[in-house]
Amino acid sequence: MSKELTIWVVIGIYAVFMLAVGILNSKKGSGMAEFTVGGRNAGAWISALSYGTAYFSAVMFIGYSGGSGWSFGLYSSLVGIGNAVIGSYLAWKVLAGRTRETTRRLKIKSMPQLFEKRFHSRGMKLFSCIVIFIFLLPYSASVYKGLTSVCSILLNIDEQVCMVIIAIASAVVLVLGGYMATLKADFVQGIVMMFGVVALLIMVVVSPKVGGLENGFNRMQEYMQQNGMAPLNMESAVSLVATILMTSFGTWGLPQMIHKYYGIRDEREVKRGTIISTFFAFLVAGGGYFIGSFSHLFFGNQLPEGGKDYLIPNMLNMSNLPDILIGIVLVLLISASVSTLSSITLTACSTLSMDLVRDRIRPQIKDQNLAVLTRFLCLLFVVGSYVVANYPTPILEMMSYSWGIISGAFLAPYLISLYWKKINRAGAWAGMLGGFCTAFIPVAISGFKTPHGPVYACAAMLVSLVLCFAVSLLAAKFHWKGSEENPAFYGEGK
């Protein structure tokens, strides 16, 4: 059997599985509650692996691990560790339990609904709905770009064909099955990802270019010292810290990640999910960034054709992987990408249908018809992602723009709302708008070409945090409009 045929057979088996999951769940998601939160009955393994597969896609494996490894060498592994400790363990410890309890008690199905319930502001609900839908598009597009770069190298197929394949795969699962279909698919895909990363790590480390773990580590240390990468200079150190913080804390404000907490069955499953999610992140993110840290051993100082987005694909091609393992690696990347794309699409489109169409345009629309509309919007979103993916922006930058703008606007008001009862509408608006502008304006001025997206993202999250506290206190002290508290949100009073 030829190399290409072997790889296509493995991918074909995966595609059949995805279709089966969608069909089996097609009759279980007729209403919006089932379609968006799965009846709030998800267990720890399904929730945690769904969180992890939404977190780590081909964007991480291809864009971030390759780009970070090229810029920071062995230091790039710190990004994976940060993702596990901050982006998974701390995120679940701080956010999961509170979010699950609050959204279940108040029957909240989206982030805009949470803001409306907490701050009694339909304007805030509309603003967050529009921002989420528009600025999740570049994140979704970056997933396309990550997968197409590796398929074009390993399978020698046209990038447009690859984009169509991933779009169809994610659309089938979403349109047919909704939330529980994506959760069940993510569970199996998470298992595939863990085994795939382990196999990939072993094969890259033992490849002739690396020559084993100890030899590769020593050679990279020597290379970094000779080329001024160790110790890091101030500019590189700031960039590394910004990348760690953005990819770790940034997930705390992403609606598609927070959405995973809504459907958890009970507090016991939250505790179990914390452990599982952290282990998954250590293995997948830590392994992915560790692979990228050896990129200079393959290419020296000369980037491959296509730039940083093509580092990891060419590394895999140069590692002499067995055909069957290349197929598994591609399934790993497709699985990760489809999971992330499905989560992004479901979050963006259900938010638009529930919080714009039902709230502002057609309040009397039936629940079942709203679910049908959401499925249609999912198809449109997938097409829109394809269009944006053709914009010539590197994966790492495209993703950082999305994360920076969305988390910059929403992380602080969401997080503070869970724990601080004195945050008010004035403070939340200040935090949202301040964070949004801090991330969006410099990126827009650059024509979405600035390489400093992670730095602006971190600045936006910090500005938003400060404004939420400062303006809330000022509004309460001077009795501004929008300074009232909301004890009912916390289960107090009536």
Image: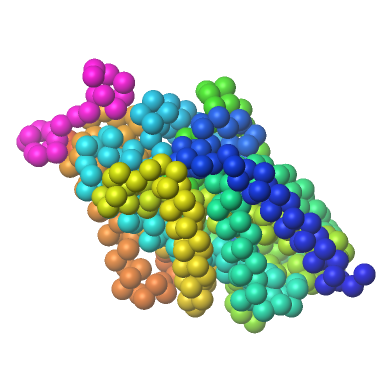
| Residue 477 falls within the magenta-colored stretch | yes
Q: Nearer the viewer, residue 101 or 201?
A: 101
Residue 358 picture location, percent across and down: 32, 47
Stretch of the chain drawn in magenta:
475-494
Can residue 408 be seen in the rendering of this structure?
no
Q: Residue at x 39, y 25 (%)?
A: 105
Residue 436 picture location, percent across and down: 30, 56
Q: Is 300 drawn above or below residue 247 in the view shown?
A: below
Q: Nearer the viewer, residue 490 or 246?
A: 490
Residue 390 picture location, percent across and down: 51, 76
Judge from the rendering whether residue 246 lies leftward or rightward of residue 66; answer left or right: left
Q: Residue at x 38, y 43 (%)?
A: 366
Residue 453 falls in image quadrant: bottom left
Please state the total of marks drawn on the protein image: 0
Residue 423 falls in image quadrant: top left
| Residue 274 falls within the magenta-colored stretch | no
Residue 120 falls in image quadrant: top left
Q: Residue at x 71, y 44 (%)?
A: 188
Judge from the rendering whether residue 93 lies leftward or rightward of residue 196; answer left or right: left
Can residue 18 be seen in the rendering of this structure?
yes
